[in-house]
Image (cartoon, grey):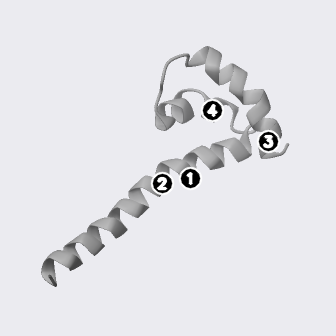
Amino acid sequence: MSLKTEILVAKPMLVMKFPNDTDLSTVLSEHLLEYKEVFSELCKLYAGALVIGVSSASCESSSTQLRVLNP
């Protein structure tokens, strides 16, 4: 199944299960991982979205520290 198809199928299910704003890790851990075989591409997308914040934060922190050391 393609990512577009997985999103079309998963969206109504996730909206019903999580009607309020919910963070990505909760949606992934509490619901999507149960259906990992069915929504494999969507699980990869969610996992990637969770990692991007962490990996970019370390880069931003390094560049900020560099500016402080070399004004």
Residue 38 visible: no
Q: Are marks 3 and 2 in contact (CB under 8 Å)?
A: no
Q: Are marks 1 and 4 in contact (CB under 8 Å)?
A: no
Using residue 15 as the reference point, say whether residue 68 is left or right of it: left
Q: Which residue is mark 4?
A: 32
Of mark 3 and mark 4, the one earlier in the sequence is: 3
User: In the image as oriented, which residue stretches furthest toward the right?
Assistant: 1
Question: Which structural element holds mark 2?
Answer: helix
Residue 63 image point, x, y percent: 29, 74
Residue 41 visible: yes
Residue at 36 percent across and 69 percent down: it is 59
Residue 71 image point, x, y percent: 14, 82
Instruction: Tell me the number on the disc at residue 48.
Output: 1
CA separation in Å, label 3 and label 4:
16 Å
Of mark 1 and mark 4, the one earlier in the sequence is: 4
Q: Are marks 1 and 2 in contact (CB under 8 Å)?
A: yes
CA separation in Å, label 3 and label 2:
21 Å
Q: Which residue is mark 3?
A: 4
CA separation in Å, label 1 and label 4:
14 Å
Amino acid type of the residue that numbered disc 4 sits on in the rendered structure: Leu
Q: Are marks 4 and 2 in contact (CB under 8 Å)?
A: no
Using residue 39 as the reference point, say whether residue 66 is left or right of it: left
Q: Which residue is mark 2?
A: 51
Using residue 1 as the reference point, say whether residue 38 is left or right of it: left
Amino acid type of the residue that numbered disc 1 sits on in the rendered structure: Gly
CA separation in Å, label 1 and label 3:
16 Å
Of mark 3 and mark 2, the one earlier in the sequence is: 3
Dividing the picture into quadrants, the one containing residue 11 is: top right
Amino acid type of the residue that numbered disc 2 sits on in the rendered structure: Val
Dividing the picture into quadrants, the one containing residue 12 is: top right
Of mark 4 and mark 2, the one earlier in the sequence is: 4
User: In the image as oriented, which residue stretches furthest toward the bottom?
Assistant: 70
